[in-house]
Image (cartoon, rainbow, N blue to C red):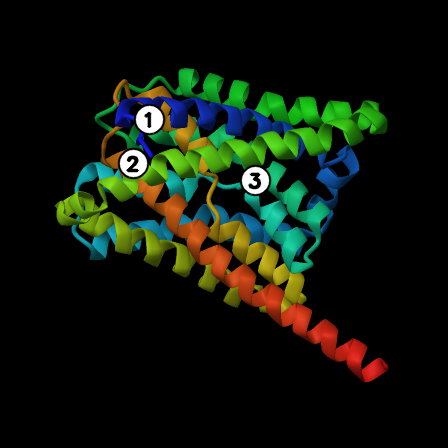
Amino acid sequence: MAVLPPGLLYDIGTIAIYVFVLSSMFLTGLMVTVGDLVAPVRNRRLLSLALISNFIIAPLIALTLIALIPMNEELAAGLLLVSIAAGAPSTAKVAQITGGNMAQAVSMTVLMTIITVIILPFLLPFILEDAQIDPLFILANLVMLILIPILCGILVRNRSETVTARLLPVMDWVSNLSIAVIFLTYGILFLSQFEGIIRTSSGAIAVPVAILFTLAALGITYLLGRWFEENARLDLAFGAGFRNITAALVVVFASFADVQNDVFLMVLMVSIFAVIIVSILVGIIFKKQRDAGKKEKGSGA
């Protein structure tokens, strides 16, 4: 089977990124009502831990890794960018699989995303010092590609449950297909160049740093969530471990004419290894829950 040229794969992946950003954000909005959005605010302890884990602990982990592991400025900038970007759309899907509170996960995702959109553009000049950055331009990109689709989804959900019911499976399909295309195209590019990447100083550093960052964000948040019930604790941990790659990619594409740099490499590595690590953990949790369910049925027979 003929392999598509790298340039074409890259173009397809880039288009898929924009489709994923718009569809996943709109889908996120469709899954939450105004009431759902307000609900987490009432649970101050849960909201406080979510804010602390996403906007204090994750950046501190990134800063610690930057201090301990020698890396160039672009890799450090990519790691900091990812650490500040909170509100991953995938968190709701994980909550659904692991038996968590899906409505709460979605509403938390929306709130974390809104905060990310507000603060990220004004922190970028301190993170991406060598990039030509206009905070208002970045803010406009984040608002148009992330915030407006979410608000449109919320508006549709609150106006018509019938339309929402029809759109949900369609947008879910588009979102899943686009993320599959992203991982397929960039996965092929990554694997085709994997040996070369890990042999470079940047690649050799980016891979272990991405793994350590994800494990630390997951583990520390899970430990801090010991006051909550298990499902809420897991939702918080996965919310911290899964960064908002959507927002990070919007920033990268808006900030650089050529995104094939170490900033993009670090964002991509964190994305790939977060998916791998979270998928393994979700699979383990799902299997345990299924086995526990079988035992309960067996004992009740």
Q: Earlier in the sequence, mark 2 or mark 1?
A: 1
- Across and down, in percent, residue 234 comes to 59, 60
- Residue 286 found in image quarter: bottom right
Residue at the far front in the pictured view? 1
Q: Which tag is nearer the camera, tag 3 or tag 2?
A: 2
User: Of the residues shown, which amino acid type is indicated by label 2?
Assistant: Leu
**Residue 10: mark:** 1
* Residue visible at 36% across and 23% down in the picture: 253
Residue wearing tag 3 = 89
Instruction: Find the distance from the CA under tag 1 to the CA under tag 3.
Output: 23 Å
* Residue visible at 40% across and 30% down in the picture: 249
Q: Earlier in the sequence, mark 1 or mark 3?
A: 1
- Across and down, in percent, residue 145 comes to 52, 22
Residue wearing tag 2 = 189
Quarter the C terminus occupies: bottom right
Instruction: Find the distance from the CA under tag 3 to the CA under tag 2.
Output: 24 Å
* Residue visible at 35% across and 29% down in the picture: 124
Q: Secondary structure at mark 1?
A: helix
- Residue 294 found in image quarter: bottom right
* Residue visible at 16% across and 51% down in the picture: 70
Question: Is there a contact, CB below 8 Å, between mark 2 and mark 1?
Answer: yes
User: Is 115 placed above or below 153 here?
Assistant: below
Q: Residues within 10 Å of mark 2 (few under 14, many from 20)?
A: some
Q: Is residue 129 left or right of residue 214?
A: left
Question: Is there a contact, CB below 8 Å, between mark 3 and mark 2?
Answer: no
Q: Secondary structure at mark 3?
A: loop
User: Of the residues shown, which amino acid type is indicated by label 3?
Assistant: Pro
Q: Earlier in the sequence, mark 3 or mark 2?
A: 3
Q: Nearer the viewer, residue 14 or 235?
A: 14
User: Of the residues shown, which amino acid type is indicated by label 1?
Assistant: Tyr
Quarter the N terminus occupies: top left
